[in-house]
Image (cartoon, coloured by chain):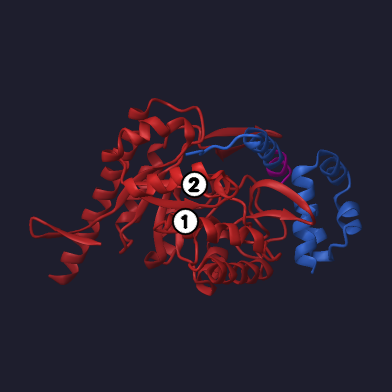
């Protein structure tokens, strides 16, 4: 959406928070400062009717988006139809503005990994992901946004680097991108590439949503890696990446702050949302100055 | 088919400590036993060991944190 403000056209980005039970009171009492709420879909697949009713009530008060964690779409293995059907039912009930999932594999050979892991970046997982995303669109009725994931290991057996692999998946699939900027920062730090250059190589017009989070350093065998743990505040570098992104992306962005524990007072999280708005505004201003310069 | 076998092998060494220890002691032997092709075996011989250990630790912590806990009940 583009709005007029004092004769200047501005893109209307929105900034919100991931719904967590521990944050419920804070979120519900500050909906005037939270534009959108992201709810984890999987926990609600088999939830009692009361909980699903509460989700619908939340969706009546504010914009809601759904985020999945267990489909394992980036895999040479076909996605489980049952999970897609549960996603479809939830989407039908809640009518979210969008739903999203990760470019991750979460199971293989009957082993449930229990969390998101980076698949080998190969032709097989590119084709598998594209096929799974098409299937998701067919069953759910809309394609998910897909999110880049953080990894502590460069996936063994890969033929592509991360940027080429993501671009190939996006190119072949109906899905647009949910760009997690802390995941990007962590992978860039751990595997020695430039996060801003990575951003520049993504198709800007396919980026619709953003995740922000924090992390910490971990160490093994004398090597340090940055872990995306969602337990720490958003670092400055991630806000700077948000500004860089807002300077080039043409679409309005839905930006979600993810926090999964070590919860600070809600005011601290709200200040991080305000900081994200400032970062977005700075990037948007740069974009419009560039457009005006090119038009002059 | 081999792609699925590689994913299955990775899932196992990420999650199961015994499998991981056997693999780290003999990457080629364990990968060959799983039916992986020569290219995949070669890649696994060069695996980033620090990354593997940290991935396994992180997954274990996350699984523990999530087990029995719904993070977002409305």
Q: Label 1 is found on which chain of the structure?
A: A
Q: Residues within 10 Å of mark 1 (few under 14, many from 20)?
A: few
Residue A2: where, in percent of width, then height?
A: 22, 62
Read off the magenta span: B48-53
Sequence-first tag of 2 and 1: 2
Identify the residue at horizontal 45%, vertical 65% (top origin): A176
Residue A277: where, in percent of width, then height?
A: 28, 44
Q: Which chain is blue?
A: B
Identify the residue at horizontal 66%, vertical 66% (top origin): A125
The residue tagged 2 is: A52
Q: Which chain is red?
A: A
Is there CB contact under 8 Å for labels 2 and 1?
yes
The residue tagged 1 is: A93
Question: On the rendered structure, is A189 left or right of B37?
Answer: left
Question: On the rendered structure, is A85 left or right of A267?
Answer: right
In the image, is residue B27 above or below residue A7?
A: above
Q: Residues within 10 Å of mark 2 (few under 14, many from 20)?
A: some
* Residue lying at the far left of the rendered structure: A6
Question: On the rendered structure, is A232 left or right of A271?
Answer: right
Q: Label 2 is found on which chain of the structure?
A: A
In the image, is residue A3 above or below residue B60?
A: below
Taking depth in this image into account, of A4 and B47 the one nearest to the observer is A4
Taking depth in this image into account, of B7 and A191 the one nearest to the observer is B7
- Image quarter hosting the C terminus of chain A: bottom left
* Residue lying at the far front of the rendered structure: A49
* Residue lying at the far top of the rendered structure: A265
């Amino acid at each position: 959406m583009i709005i007029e403000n004092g004769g200047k056209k501005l893109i209307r980005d929105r900034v919100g928070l991931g719904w967590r039970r521990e944050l419920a009171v804070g979120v519900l009492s500050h909906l005037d400062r939270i534009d959108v709420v992201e709810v984890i879909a999987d926990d609600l697949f088999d939830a009692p009717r009361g909980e699903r009713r509460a989700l619908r009530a939340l969706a009546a008060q504010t914009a809601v988006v759904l985020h999945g964690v267990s489909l394992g779409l980036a895999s040479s293995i076909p996605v489980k139809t049952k999970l897609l059907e549960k996603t479809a039912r939830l989407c039908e009930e809640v009518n979210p503005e969008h739903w999203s999932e990760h470019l991750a594999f979460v199971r293989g050979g009957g082993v449930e990994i229990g969390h998101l892991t980076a698949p080998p970046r190969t032709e097989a997982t590119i084709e598998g992901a594209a096929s799974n995303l098409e299937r998701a669109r067919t069953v759910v009725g809309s394609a998910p946004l897909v999110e880049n994931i953080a990894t502590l290991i460069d996936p063994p057996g890969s033929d592509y680097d991360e940027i080429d692999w993501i671009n190939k998946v996006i190119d072949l699939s109906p899905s647009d991108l949910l760009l997690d900027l802390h995941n990007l920062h962590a992978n860039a730090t751990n595997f020695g590439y430039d996060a801003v250059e990575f951003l520049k190589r993504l198709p800007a017009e396919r980026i619709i949503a953003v995740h922000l989070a924090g992390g910490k350093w971990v160490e093994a065998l004398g090597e340090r890696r940055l872990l995306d743990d969602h337990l720490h505040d958003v670092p400055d570098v991630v806000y700077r990446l948000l500004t860089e992104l807002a300077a080039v992306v043409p679409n309005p962005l839905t930006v979600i702050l993810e926090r999964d524990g070590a919860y600070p007072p809600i005011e601290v999280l709200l200040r991080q949302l305000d900081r994200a708005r400032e970062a977005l505004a700075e990037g948007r201003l740069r974009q419009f100055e560039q457009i005006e310069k090119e038009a002059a | 088919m081999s792609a699925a076998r590689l994913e299955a092998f990775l899932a196992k060494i990420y999650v199961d400590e015994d499998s991981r220890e056997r693999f780290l002691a003999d990457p080629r032997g364990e990968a060959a036993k799983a039916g992986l092709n020569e290219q995949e075996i070669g890649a696994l011989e060069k695996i980033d060991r620090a990354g593997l250990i940290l991935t396994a630790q992180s997954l274990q912590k996350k699984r523990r944190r999530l087990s029995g806990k719904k993070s977002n009940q409305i």
